[in-house]
Amino acid sequence: MAERSGGRSGRVVRTEWVAPQVIRVVLGGEGLADFAVGPYTDSYVKLAFPLDDVLYPEPFDLGAIRATMPRDQWPRTRTYTVRKWDERAGELWIDFVTHGDSGVAGPWAAKAQPGDVLHFAGPGGGYAPDPDVAWHLMAGDESAWPAIAAALEVLPAGARAEVFVEVDGPDDEQVVRSAGRVDLRWLHRDGGPRGRLVVDAVRALAFPEGVVQVFVHGEATMVKDLRGHLKVERGVPREQMSISGYWRLGADEDGWQSSKGEWNRRVEQEQG
């Protein structure tokens, strides 16, 4: 599913710290009147953070800004997964992982107040749990948890899911309700290298019988390691996997997005 171009906006309704480094921002307002995520549980939006010293045309339209303004005046954009779209309430939930004052989106979210406006484009998406497979494998880090949680919430009754989520420690674990038979294992880094616990856990998993559908997202090197393992060693067909790096250690989103295509091409060449 391609993302919707142009622009939308939402107003902050409330915020809530759902983990020590994760703040949930709930958006509402008329700008979400026709918002819809469709069937996808990995829906994402591209948030736009205007530069302080630039005057932007009204109505704010990210596509029009990029078409008519110099690149150095474009808003900073950051991609975030939709944690939940509550159509009845007209509320959009977005969970931000914060790292103090570093970054663009995290500091904004930590300071957000009711009434603040957030511009964005989207949604995009392309994954949802297939009710016809024998079981599901979902794995990732904090950045993948919103999509994993959304998928678990819509699993049909009795659907089997093996789930691994890596976080800093026990205080970062979150609760999710699911009708499925979910074995959710939280993996605590405790200062260790990012992604290693997820890779080791999936490698050690005794795969159940039958066709599996895979959702693996998070840090790019972790995803690369698991893609090779699942495709080459486990023989999972490409069409049964949703697997991609949301971010890369040592690079901000601008740097990662500019290099992601070349990274993926190299991975394809190495792993086939």
Image: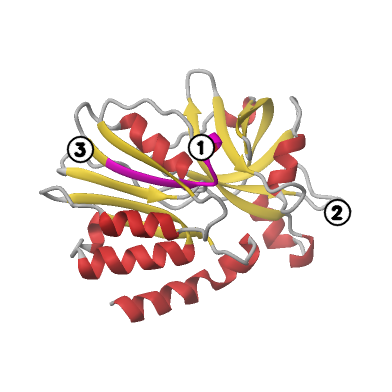
Mark 3 — residue?
131
Residue 123 in the magenta stretch? The answer is no
Q: Nearer the viewer, residue 119 or 201?
A: 201
Q: CA distance from mark 3 to mark 1?
A: 31 Å
Label 3 crowd (10 A; few <14 / some 14-19 / many >=20): some
Q: CA distance from mark 3 to mark 2?
A: 48 Å
Tell me the element at label 2. Answer: loop
Residue 167 in the magenta stretch? The answer is yes
Residue 170, disc: 1
Please state which of the two labelled residues, at mark 3 or mark 1, is closer to the viewer: 1
The image position of residue 193, as x and y in percent, is: 52, 61
Q: Sequence order check: which comes first, mark 3 or mark 1?
A: 3
Pick out the residue farthest to the right: 53
The image position of residue 217, as x and y in percent, is: 42, 54
Tell me the element at label 3. Answer: loop
In the image, which residues are magenta? 162-171
